[in-house]
Image (cartoon, rainbow, N blue to C red):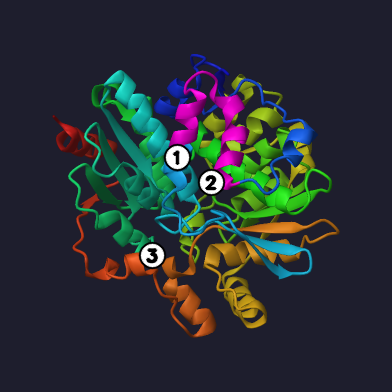
Amino acid sequence: MNYISTRGAAPVLGFQEAMLTGLARDGGLYVPETVPVIPESEIAALAGLPYEDVAFRVMRPFIGDAFADDELRRLIGAAYAGFGHAARAPLVQLGPNHFLLELFHGPTLAFKDFAMQLIGQLFQAALARTGQRITIVGATSGDTGSAAIEAFRGLSNVDVVILFPHGRVSDVQRRQMTTPAEANVHALALDGDFDDCQARLKDMFNDFAFRDAVGLAGVNSINWARVLAQVVYYFTAATSLGAPHREVSFTVPTGNFGDIFAGYIAKRMGLPIKRLVVATNQNDILHRALSSGDYLTEGVVPSISPSMDIQVSSNFERALFDAYGRDGAAVAALMADLRQGGFRISPNALGALRDTFTSGRCSEDETLATIRAVHATTGEVLCPHSAVGVKVAQEHIGPEPMVTLATAHPAKFPDAVETAIGTRPALPARMADLFDRPERVTRVPNDLAALQSLIRERTAR
């Protein structure tokens, strides 16, 4: 299996190289040269299997000879052994034809654990073979950072540096990043918003001298292995609800477009997904783009669903690449226009996107009202991101089952939940002392040179 860049001017890589590289050297994102299709009979055979077995069968065609079968099975088993639910990603029914896919039973209580725990295992195995030392730098709107730290903390051949927007993540999210005591963990609070963090991350990757000097590697959702790991739970959910013998739709609360792009890959693989619904909060650039064809940044407005407070959705580039007929030059031109504030999606490409994706928006008041209503009618407590998904899903429910992805545990966002239902959700017992642990964090300016200097100093060996 080969991987190519969405901008068409980077070397073609195998799975392991694409995983360790993260962002392509032309600034693009790696995608598989072809998407393997799973026969209907093999999809049917996934129903009822343990999550780890489904993960092996779904991911195996994308990995090629990078990992032997026995090794891959072992790494997958180790990745999910620490999850707090035997089903890993259980389904809960909210109402007629509406189901919630709980993706928050991992060690940091967010869907990012499904990908990051596996990437941690894959990276460790790959680095053990090469003897290489790397510096993982990630930008986070809240959950990716803690998931990355949890996956790589304490490793001798990895430094993990996480940029998060100062004052724009929840207290729980911040403390999950700032309380690990391991010397290889570096939490940096950047003066700016998530888009600033993401921009500085890409600047570092595009500075090849710096990239090579510190052994830069990326585990943001720009990393193809992240997307691949998330494809799996679309298969487990859909087959539990009757696929491939009936269609299933999914609604995904998203800011960076990675989680819903995984659903698109599942559909390309043959999973009978009828609709993929993009759910946005008040930072609704994806909804506006799919509605009008204009992808125009307007600035980030802080919300009670902060992990979605994004205007530059990196993984949307992967969807554009396919919508433009895999024309890397066309995508590169769009991304150049984005640096000036935005671009217009061509009519043909917009039609291609709308063939797969639809969208909706949820305001702050609607988010709180949804948390309140779902709790009153089902007893289920939603985090504000999951509530955005549920509200938009309710507007798109049809004859086929609708699955809304619940992306985080409500205890990660206790203030919003308490505002909605009057009670504060408790952290799981293993995190009960989170607010008693000392924090280690460095506040940094939104300045590339200052960041690079600090990272060189922290990772010098």
Q: Which residues are magenta?
A: 50-75
The circle on residue 170 is 3
Q: Main secondary structure of the magenta part?
A: helix
> Horizontal placement of 81 versus 447: left or right?
right
Q: Is residue 333 visible?
A: no
First-in-chain label (3 vs 2): 3
Q: Nearer the viewer, residue 299 or 60?
A: 60
Q: Nearer the viewer, residue 55 or 201?
A: 55
Label 3, label 1: how many angstroms apart (C-alpha)? 25 Å
Q: Nearer the viewer, residue 244 or 3?
A: 244
Residue found at x 67% / y 80%: 377
Q: Quadrant of residue 31?
A: top right
Q: Is residue 379 above or below residue 153?
A: below
> Horizontal placement of 220 versus 211: left or right?
right
Residue 358 image position (x, y, % from top left): 74, 50
Residue 344 image position (x, y, % from top left): 67, 38
